[in-house]
Image (cartoon, rainbow, N blue to C red):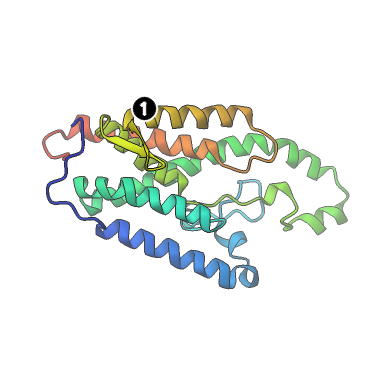
Amino acid sequence: MREFRPTRFEILPVVVKNLLIINGIVFLAQITFGDKFNLLNLFALHTWQSPLFKPWQFITHMFMHGNFEHLFGNMFALWMFGSILENVWGPKRFLIFYLVCGLGAALCHMIVLYYDMQSVVEAFRMLPFDQQEAYFYSDKLKLNEATLGASGAVFGCLAAFGYLFPNTRIYIYFLFPLKAKWFVIIYAGLELLLAIQNSAGDNVAHVAHLGGALVGILLVYYWNKNNKKTFF
């Protein structure tokens, strides 16, 4: 399939619609109850070395966002690319795809973060015991920085769209047409460059974006290769 040409197309299919609703409700809860109940500490993703890490954060962090712009950008991309994928695959397969991409993105991010945090762990261990106690659960400790957002799963959707419909034109800022395959390649290249640079003050999880895209491509390739008759 080279270009997406809809026949019976739902503008807002069931899984995408529910993901939009859940993300919106969670963001509202963050604004309303976030400080009171430490929602970031409980549900955003933390590195394995952090005392705030909990296994369920691999899932829950995908439904949290840092601000409205972060939420809107991810949800718009989810609707734009995810709706097409769900129409092609059906709700069950799309939901599996979305969650697997999110988990894969989180795992890639956590592996890189683990090595990045080694120097922080060593420095923390050298502090006097009373200072360790004071900073152990503090947000000021770099070890306790949170990662949140649906970006990894959304990048998986973007990569899958580019793989399945490479010649479909995407309009950048609604003005400049660019084929999906080039959009994905350029975007992935930029993310890779930013991940390598690892600039101070850059709090975007570029490795998670790349991880989500990689998992998305691999999953679509596997499904397409092993189930060609029923894939679309």
The quadrant the N terminus occupies is top left
Query: Considering only vertical position in the picture, is 161 above or below 61?
Result: above
Residue 20 appears in which quarter of the rendering?
A: bottom left
Q: Position of residue 170 (x, y in %)?
A: 33, 37
Q: Is residue 126 left or right of residue 198?
A: right
Front in this rendered view, residue 208 or 223: 208
Check the image and name the residue furthest to the front.
175
Q: Is residue 57 visible?
A: no
The residue sitting at 45% across, 32% down in the picture is 187
Front in this rendered view, residue 206 or 227: 206
Count of residue discs: 1
Q: Position of residue 203 (x, y in %)?
A: 62, 43
Q: Is residue 66 left or right of residue 76?
A: right
Front in this rendered view, residue 227 or 204: 204
Front in this rendered view, residue 199 or 93: 199
Q: Is residue 139 left or right of residue 154?
A: right
The quadrant the C terminus occupies is top left
Q: Position of residue 46 (x, y in %)?
A: 60, 50
Q: Position of residue 142 (x, y in %)?
A: 72, 47
The residue sitting at 48% across, 65% down in the picture is 26
Query: Considering only vertical position in the picture, is 162 above or below 88?
Result: above
Circle 1 residue:
182
The residue sitting at 30% across, 38% down in the picture is 161
Q: Is residue 120 visible?
A: yes
Q: Is residue 208 left or right of residue 182?
A: right
Disc 1 packing (10 Å; few <14; some 14–19; many ≥20): some
Q: Secondary structure at mark 1?
A: helix
Residue 12 appears in which quarter of the rendering?
A: bottom left
- Three-letter amino acid code at the position of disc 1: Trp
